[in-house]
Every structure is written in C-alpha cells, then in structure tokens.
Amino acid sequence: MKLNMKRVALGLIMAACLFSLSACSKADTAAEEVDARIQTQMEQLPGSFLELYTGLEDSQVPEFKKNMQSQDEYAALAEGVDSWENIKHELGSLVSIGDTVKVEAIDHGYSATINAVFEKRNMEFSITTDSKLTKITSVAFVPEYTLGERMEKAVFNTLMGMGTVFIVLIFISWLIGCFRYIGKLEDKINGKAQEPAPEPIPEVSVPAAEEDEELVDDLELVAVITAAIAASEGSSPSGLVVRSIRRAPSGKWKKA
C-alpha cells in the first residue's frame, strides 16, 4: 500500500513539474504541428497516469478522488477513477505499457494516447490538457473488443431497445383499454350512477254512477210512466212532457 501511495505521489510531482516547465512555452496549433518541447512533455503523461490508475487499490480510491477533486487542475483525474472502476474487471492485470505515444493538437489543448496490454484484452488510454499544459481536462479508457464481442453487444442493445418499445406499446394499449372503465368508476365513486326510473302506475277509470244515467232513450218506459202520472192526476197524457228519468234511491222503497 505504501508503494502504491509513493507511485501516486511521484506521478503527481512529475506532472506538476511538467506543467510548471510548460507555463512559458507556446504551440503552433493552427498548423496542426506540436512543438518539440510540448511533444516531449505530453509523451510522459499518459504512461505515468495509467500506472497511477492500475496501482490504485479499492481502499485507496475514496482518498485519491478526494485529493484530486480538491485541486482544479487534477479534477478530471477523479472523474476518470469511476471509468476505470467500471472497466478494470474486463481488462485483468496490467502486462505492459507501449513505448509509442501519439500526441495531437486539439481544440483548446493537446491529447496524448498510448496503448497498453492487459491479461484479457488491450486498451487505449488517452489524456487531454489545456493549451498551456497547466490543467488536465479529461482522461479516457477505450478497451479493444473483438468482432464477436461487438456483434454480441450490438444484438443485445437491439433486443433491449425493441423489447422496451414493445413493452411500452403494450402498456399504452392496456391503458387505453381501461379508459372505458374510468367513467363508470367515477360515477360509482361520486354516487352519480343512474338508477332505472319506476314504471308509472296505470290509472283505473271509475265508471259513472248508475244513479246519474238518463233513461231518455227507453221509449216504452217513458210511455208507461206518462200514462201512470196522467191517470193519477186525472188529466190527458198529451199534456205531459217527460224530459228525464232518474232512478230513485233504493232506501225509500225499503221504508215504504
């Protein structure tokens, strides 16, 4: 553990020295040519920082990130720790670091890229700085995958994408199908469900009383009654006119 911390300290001291020496140097970025002094300084960065990452133990990661985040010129190294932790299980142990470093002039700075050999696969490591070489702006770890691994990942991503789309479409279809129950559920909750109207009670017509029935059309009965009245009065039936005949209450006949 002490050896790894010494490597970290040595790497940071080396980087600080390189940055301090390059403070007064200038590069001709317009012509895409890197100054020889900057070329030499950039070539020493990726190898030393890659050794820092590969030498970190899990117990040292939190302290390393805290120290890097406290210094603005090294804050990008703290972000690179997360990338390294995500891919180091795919690489295995470090075997060797290449001797050739590719230095390029980029927008607002420079980049240096180096190849490294690990147990499981090779990796390309790159580091970028600002134009004055006073700040590290980013680090990148790019493992080299075989064609079969790339195809496997492509198929997996395709299936994941299509599966997600179909799941969302099925959910939307189910949600639309539930719309017809929303209105009924709302009416039930609010007590607005319509009940069937009661059937109207049929009206029963009451026939007219037989006491009010006029018997004018019964001519024979009229003639008999007229003759009886004329005989009791001692007058002629022609002088009597019967306009209506009504039935007398039965109670009077019973009393007679």
Image (spheres, rainbow, N blue to C red):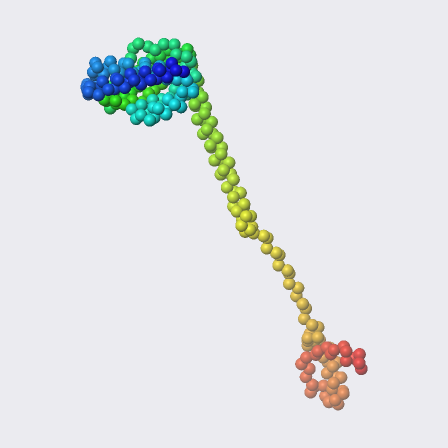
Query: Residue 221's image quarter?
Result: bottom right
Q: Residue 248, image x and y in percent? A: 73, 79
User: Which residue is at the front of the view, 145 or 141?
Assistant: 141
Query: Residue 64's image quarter?
Result: top left
Residue at image point 43% right, 23% down: 157
Q: Residue 50, image x and y in percent? A: 34, 16
Which quadrant is the C terminus positioned in? Answer: bottom right
Taking 101 as reference, is 237 above or below it?
below
Residue 101 falls left or right of residue 250: left
Residue at image point 59% right, 55% down: 197
User: Which residue is at the front of the view, 85 or 152?
Assistant: 85
Q: Residue 192, image x and y in percent? A: 54, 51
User: Which residue is at the front of the view, 111 or 82?
Assistant: 82
Residue 109 falls left or right of residue 93: left
Residue at image point 29% right, 16% down: 14
Which quadrant is the N terminus positioned in? Answer: top left
Residue at image point 80% right, 79% down: 254
Is any part of residue 71 visible from this angle?
yes
Q: Residue 117, image x and y in percent? A: 37, 11
Is any part of residue 79 visible from this angle?
no
Residue 54 falls left or right of residue 181: left
List the single residue furthest toward the front.
2
Query: Residue 63's image quarter?
Result: top left
How many numbered discs sit on the rendered protein?
A: 0
User: Which residue is at the front of the view, 32 or 68?
Assistant: 68
